[in-house]
Amino acid sequence: MFSGNRIPYVLRPQECCFLRKHDTSNAFTLLLLLLCFLLVFQGLHAQSGHHSIDIEHIQSDSLFQSSQRIHVLTLKGNWRKHMNIGIFQPKQGLSKTSEIGLANDAVAAINGSFFNRKSGTGVVYLESEGVPLAQTVSGDLDFLQNGAIRITHSGEIHISEAQQDVFYRNSSKEAFVLVSGPLLLKKGKAEVLENHPFVTNRHPRTCICQTPSELKFIVVDGRSTVAHGMCLSELQKFLMGIGCVDALNLDGGGSSTLWSAKNGIINIPSDKNGERPVSSAILILED
């Protein structure tokens, strides 16, 4: 069932409240799922090289009646005293998440938002160090642009509903802005999702979330026999289960990448050639 040296991970009671609050129509099924989850859901803690960063690898062969491999990087404690978050794009074209991290001397990085692979340009609003670098392109998938992560000049992080590009261009409060979507959680409640294959099919996923005291970078592996990926409703349930309050979906699929300077690529990207070049990345930086 499992291989390697793994440390059991058990959900705390307060992390299980979403079963009562959000899934009462399937309470019995989800209770059985939770029992399986507690039996086979395990994690491996990795050394991140920084006492404020915890990296956990989670593997289960029964979560959501599927095989799942999940990677969670958590910023904990007083991390804001010596680290900050930035959003950057390559100087030209597309670059791998790890390359963007290395170019900016980052501690860790996760891939950012959506882009056009042919043109090599982002298709959602991106503002980096107060400078607008990409604008939102409207189309048939506008629901993928309904959320944003905003970082103020003082380092405050906000995950919320997206505004029009002009709002951010005219605002002097933000140092970094990245539009993405869909917005998954808002104030502890699951957002209503579109009935679209992007949402309902299982894929590798990348997301960022806030708990009352922590910031989490999460990648779900997929498109393999040992990692099926998640649909977005499954991702919402998982995020609520680990205590997330606000959460935003980022670009997934072959783009899903979690990297740290000490450990390299933390997840297993689904593209056959490995890590995919992307148009943006969210970085953890030391002050």
Image: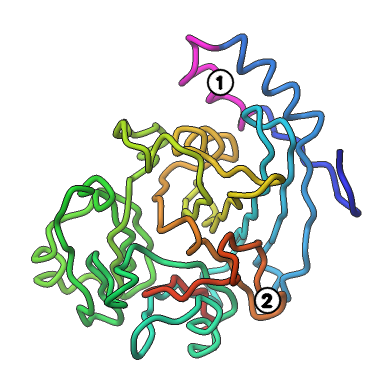
Q: Indicate left or right for 10 with 86 as reference.
A: right
- Magenta region includes residue 93: no
- Could you tell me which residue is drawn at 16 percent across and 67 percent down? 168
Q: Is the magenta stretch mostly helix, strand or loop?
A: helix
Image height of 25 relative to 34, above or below: above
* Label 1 crowd bin: few (<14), some (14–19), many (20+), radius 10 Å: some
Q: Indicate left or right for 62 with 140 as reference.
A: right
**Image-quadrant location for residue 156:** bottom left
- Magenta region includes residue 15: yes
Frontmost residue, 132 versus 76: 132
Spot occupied by residue 34 in the image (x, y as percentages of width and height): 68, 23
* Labels 2 & 1 near each other (Cβ < 8 A): no
- Disc 2 element: strand
Residue indicated by mark 2: 264
- Disc 1 element: helix
**Which three-letter amino acid code belongs to the residue tagged 1?**
Leu
**Which three-letter amino acid code belongs to the residue tagged 2?**
Gly
* Label 2 crowd bin: few (<14), some (14–19), many (20+), radius 10 Å: few
Residue indicated by mark 1: 19
Image height of 183 relative to 272, above or below: above
- The span shown in magenta is 14-26
> Closer to the camera: disc 2 or disc 1?
2
- Could you tell me which residue is drawn at 65 percent across and 62 percent down? 267
Spot occupied by residue 38 in the image (x, y as percentages of width and height): 76, 29
Give the tally of numbered discs.
2
Earlier in the chain: of badge 2 and badge 1, it is 1
Frontmost residue, 76 versus 170: 170
Frontmost residue, 201 versus 58: 201
Q: Which colour scheme is used?
A: rainbow
Spot occupied by residue 33 in the image (x, y as percentages of width and height): 67, 22
